Amino acid sequence: MTYSTLHAAAYLHHIELESSNPARLAKFYGDAMQMQVEKHGDVFVCHGPQRRLIVSKGQDKKLALGAFACRDAEALEGLRGRAAKEGLNPQDAPSLLMDKAFAVIDPDGNRILFGLAKKDPEGLKGLKGPTQHLTLATHDPEAIEAFYAGKLGFAVSDRVRKPNGEVATIFTRSNHEHHTLACFRSDRVGVDHHSYEAGEWNVIRDWCDHLATLDIQLMWGPGRHGPGNNLFIFIVDPDGNWIEISAELEIIHDRPVKEWPHAERTLNLWGKGILRS
Ligand SMILES: [Fe+2]
């Protein structure tokens, strides 16, 4: 059997962001994203219901790592075996939030972990919004697709293509959710945004009301994306990272890859789109 992230039902468990001011950034996530913040040595661990984020000292807007949890130890071992066979040189990666994790490095130098979720703390309170997807910015979407889909077995859901045939965006999934890892062609390399899935429209309303109490304005939306058909709002953290809160993300059981034109309407069926390239 060729193991893949799809067989492993992998989901985005957490990300780690670097920051020149980790205490400030962690406090923002604590307040805005309703997460409990704890300092562990040099890093801040932020925990809300089914959402987690680590902030470490470093360069603003830099992804330290993206971490996917697999459904069980057998799937994780299978995926590690495949990564080794594909020449990805998986390395043991001790993690505060996952057990038995291994790391691989993607073509842009992003560090990606796969592991088994450790138990979340008890009694976390807050609005619904599990960590759901990570979207990269890259010069080379084809190389990102070849790595994540070709070597790790993510499935391609949708592609957005420019009139000249160049791919602008690729959406890939590691479970039934339309995308858990996506990428935009960009003039920079790193993170485009990360997302929390509120599930339902009314919960987005509640998030907006909560953000309003903190005087945090929406940067984009509300709108509805074409690919994934999800409702969205975007806010920006103090370092300039984009945060998405989404709902109604498409669940895919079995359908062919769909191609979309590179147009404002693809990014937002309702209004203004933010084209990345
Ligand atoms: Fe997104």
Image: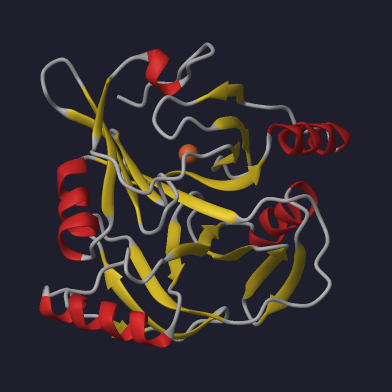
The residue nearer to you, when weighing 127 against 219, is: 127
Position of residue 82 relative to residue 144, above or below, is: below
In the picture, measured across the screen, residue 248 lies left or right of residue 183, that is right
Q: Is residue 140 visible?
A: no
Q: Is residue 154 visible?
A: yes
In the picture, measured across the screen, residue 166 lies left or right of residue 243, that is left
The residue nearer to you, when weighing 174 against 124, is: 174
Q: Quadrant of residue 149?
A: bottom left
Tell me the residue at 17%/81% (across/down).
84
Q: Position of residue 81 (x, y in %)?
A: 21, 83
In the picture, measured across the screen, residue 22 lies left or right of residue 264, that is right
Count the marks: how many?
A: 0
Q: Position of residue 113 (x, y in %)?
A: 39, 72
- Screen quadrant of the C terminus: top left
Tell me the residue at 81%/55% (across/down).
126
Colour mapping used in the image: secondary structure
Q: Position of residue 36 (x, y in %)?
A: 78, 65
- Judged from this view, the residue extending furthest toward the top is 271
- Judged from this view, the residue extending furthest toward the front is 254
- Judged from this view, the residue extending furthest toward the right is 213
Q: Quadrant of residue 175?
A: bottom left
Position of residue 11 relative to residue 145, above or below, is: below
Tell me the residue at 24%/55% (across/down).
108
In the picture, measured across the screen, residue 216 lies left or right of residue 1, that is right
Q: Position of residue 121 (x, y in %)?
A: 74, 77
Tell me the residue at 60%/48% (across/down).
196
The residue nearer to you, when weighing 251 against 93, is: 251
- Screen quadrant of the N terminus: bottom left
Position of residue 213 relative to residue 62, above or below, is: above
